Image (tube, helix red, strand yellow):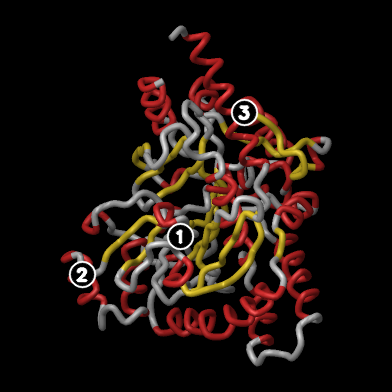
Amino acid sequence: MTTTTRDASRLSANEAAVEAMLSAEPELIDVLPALEAVPGMAKDIILVSGPLMRWQDYTGCQRLAVVGAAVFEGLAASPAEADGLLRSGAIRLASCHEYGAVGSLTGVCSASMPVLVVQDRLSGRTATCRTNEGAGTRALTFGSQGPAVNANLARIRDRVAPALARILRASPIPLLPIMARALAMGDELHGRQTAAGLLFRNAVLERLVHLRGNAPETPALLAYLDTAEFHFLHVAMAAAKVIADRSDSIPGSSIVTAMAMNEKEFAVRVSGLPGQWFRAPLPPISGFPGRIMAPWTPADLGYSGGDSLIMETLGLGGAAAAAAPALSPVSVGTPAQMMELTSSLYAVASSEHPTMRIPALGGRGVPWGMDAVAIVERRLVPPVHIGATLRSGGLAGAIYFTPPLQPFIDAIERLQSIV
């Protein structure tokens, strides 16, 4: 096969992948315990974000979160016992992506934890993401442990999740309209979710007034929606997973279907190589710009993993920085530089989204369908807006993260070797 023919075949495959993503219509339909909603989930499984490593290779925030989840779930009575059970395999680790799920930062999810269930209305495909833990900088998502963390997890499980589930079962919430309006209102749908959160709360309230009776958990839900700044991020992540998965397994396609991290590696997947992670070590976290809350410094930070890079996979988040000038202190620089950044990424995208548009760029759609070949040729990796976590657990601020290029190079070399 000549290079010209091969390229034409890839571009045709990429066009099919992009069209598949554009056809998705994600809706939030339910909130359920992970054991009930996640295919293949079991009581002894703990899900984590990013590609899976051996248990002994986890040394930071993800390790802390997994141990905390094991104790919360009742799988172990103490951190020491949890470590022993994880070493022996009596407690099993699995990657969220392998179970049709995504997880923010550490990504940890155990059987009883409530997950948001998003379904593509047309294909019936579903994806899940664990419910956000609400306000505060100490959460299992950030690698924190302890009685206060566990009490909050129980509150979300026992009061917030049932109230939201009751509303959604009566009337699912379409998500693309919220995401499109939020972009027009100053969100980029990763580091900033302010408008999306308010729009989502309004959608919940509209449905609530049509329900008969008032559940006792409703006040807890409304208080949660008022204070959980990033609750919609987890909804959007599940929606993005549903969308991206529509483009998976198209032979020859170089469209990126996932970007993710564990606490030591960055990894990517492409459509034409389903189920395969291409990995590279993460660069030192202290070198990235951002805003760190006192008394912490960049030297206190540690990677915690994260599947939330699924937003940048779709051209949102850091890739859509131009939509969210308020994030300039934790982004590439000034609002003008953010516009330049997003504008540059159209060179590595196969298309633009027809409804998710950026006012600051004259209403252009977000860069849509990231092409790993173009990323390698131009040496331009979509950057990420991500939370800055502490090595000891907890959230210290936000950073602007540029992933390494090598996984894209490896993916394309592998794809070209089989086409």
Task: Kindly check if marks 2 and 3 are in contact, taking CB atoms under 8 A apart as contact.
Answer: no
Q: Residues within 10 Å of mark 1 (few under 14, many from 20)?
A: many
Residue at the spot 49% in from the left edge and 14% down from the top edge: 6
Amino acid residing under circle 1: Thr
Q: Secondary structure at mark 3?
A: helix
Outermost front residue: 123
Residue 299 is at least partly visible in this image: no
Q: What distance separates the C-alpha of mark 2 from that of mark 3?
A: 45 Å
Q: Using the image, tell me which numbered label, if any, was put on residue 389.
A: 1
Kindly indicate the quadrant of the structure image that contains residue 275: top left
Q: Which residue is identified by label 3?
A: 15
Amino acid residing under circle 2: Ala
Q: Earlier in the sequence, mark 1 or mark 3?
A: 3
Q: Secondary structure at mark 1?
A: strand
Q: Using the image, tell me which numbered label, if any, was put on residue 90.
A: 2
Residue at the spot 48% in from the left edge and 73% down from the top edge: 138
